[in-house]
Amino acid sequence: MKFKGILKIARPNFLILAVILGILGTSIAWYEHQEFGGPFNLGYAFLATFGLIIAHAGVNIFNDYFDSRSKLDTKTQRTPFSGGSGAIQSGLITEKGALCTGIACLIIIIPIGIFFTIEQGWMLLPLLVIAVLSIILYTPFILRMGYPEWSAGLGLGVLPVLGAYFVQTGTYTMGALLASIPSGILVHNLLLLNEFPDAEYDITVKRRTLPISIGKKNAAVFYSALNIIMYLWIIGTVITHYMPAFTLIGLLTIPLAFKAINGSFKYDDRSKFIPAMAANVMTVLATQALVAAGFILAGVFNGH
């Protein structure tokens, strides 16, 4: 098993999302620490974010493993954002090596989860169980449900933010939950748009993603509507004082989102659709990073 193969199948460029999710959950907790007092542990922040990175790598690796087993990755036309890493197909890692690496990721994150459960409370346990089940069941089962995108939005969006928040506070709050919803929508839409190029190939292995279940045009409408809802959600939570006004800087990504929305309807033209996928990735990453920055700025200027 080559290190280059492990690195490629983990898809490190995709793991930026896990880092930002960890920072966002931590920034919410730090903002509340500045506003209301209470504990804050920077070491916990680093450990939780490390766990998120390993968990996300595990998702990528298991996805490639199951796609190789089904021969799907030999059929798809790979893009920078979809179609797998190609690590197995290029001989950089074997299927067995991929499976072992994915299992190793689970072995690494389990003790991290146990540590935080002991330190901060058993209420973290349901979140961890749901996250692990999402990793294991996503490719072989959830992808056949007709609407699998919810799983990514929950497991790689909402739950990581809440988890990073919980390891600092030992509790869940309505504010933290509401602040995590944009992440859920964004990660949901990240997966959704990336599924468009693979739809014809996914059918051959009995997958039922949203572009297959309702058609690409309707899926593009749904994708667009959720993007709009996500920005309205940020505005609404600021108006209702669940998020500080500084988080409105997340709205700066609206032009990127508009480019992605416009391009989502050009799914038959790869030369126009791939730039839309790129704009979507930037929207997902930048919006969450800016919201996190908003919490940090609010903590700096409003904290006691």
Image (cartoon, grey):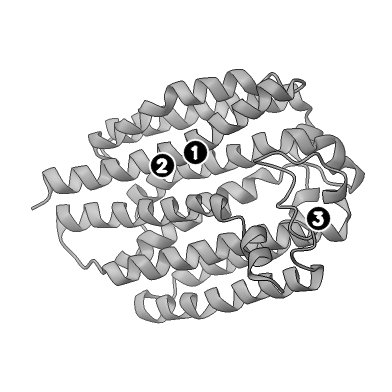
Would residue 78 be found to the left or right of residue 237 on screen?
A: right
Relative to 175, 280 lies left or right:
right
Give the residue at x 71% y 46%: 148
Dot 2: element: helix
Quadrant for residue 96, please give it: bottom right
The quarter of the picture where the N terminus appears is bottom right
Number of numbered markers: 3
On screen, residue 93 versus residue 153, left or right, reads right
Above or below, 241 against 159 in this view is: above
Specify the amino acid type for callout 1: Val
Residue at position x 27%, y 67% in the image: 42
Residue holding disc 1:
284
Task: Mark 1: give few (<14), some (14-19) or many (20+) Cα within 10 Å.
Answer: many
Provide residue 192's location: percent of width, then percent of height: 66, 37
Question: Seen in the image, is 57 located left or right of residue 287?
Answer: right
Q: Which residue is mark 2?
A: 288
Q: Nearer the viewer, mark 3 or mark 2?
A: 3
- Residue 303, can we see it? yes
- What amino acid is labelled 2 in the image? Gln
Disc number at residue 99?
A: none
Q: Mark 3 highlights which residue? A: 67
Q: CA distance from mark 3 to mark 2?
A: 29 Å
Q: Secondary structure at mark 1?
A: helix
Q: Residue furthest right?
A: 204
Give 52 or 275, whichever is nearer the viewer.
Answer: 275
Residue 295: x and y, percent? 26, 45
Cα–Cα gap, marks 3 and 1:
25 Å
Q: Tag 3, which secondary structure?
A: helix
- Contact check, label 1 and label 2, Cβ < 8 Å: yes
Q: In terms of depth relative to the viewer, which is nearer, 258 or 245?
A: 258
Alpha carbon separation for disc pair 1 and 2 = 7 Å
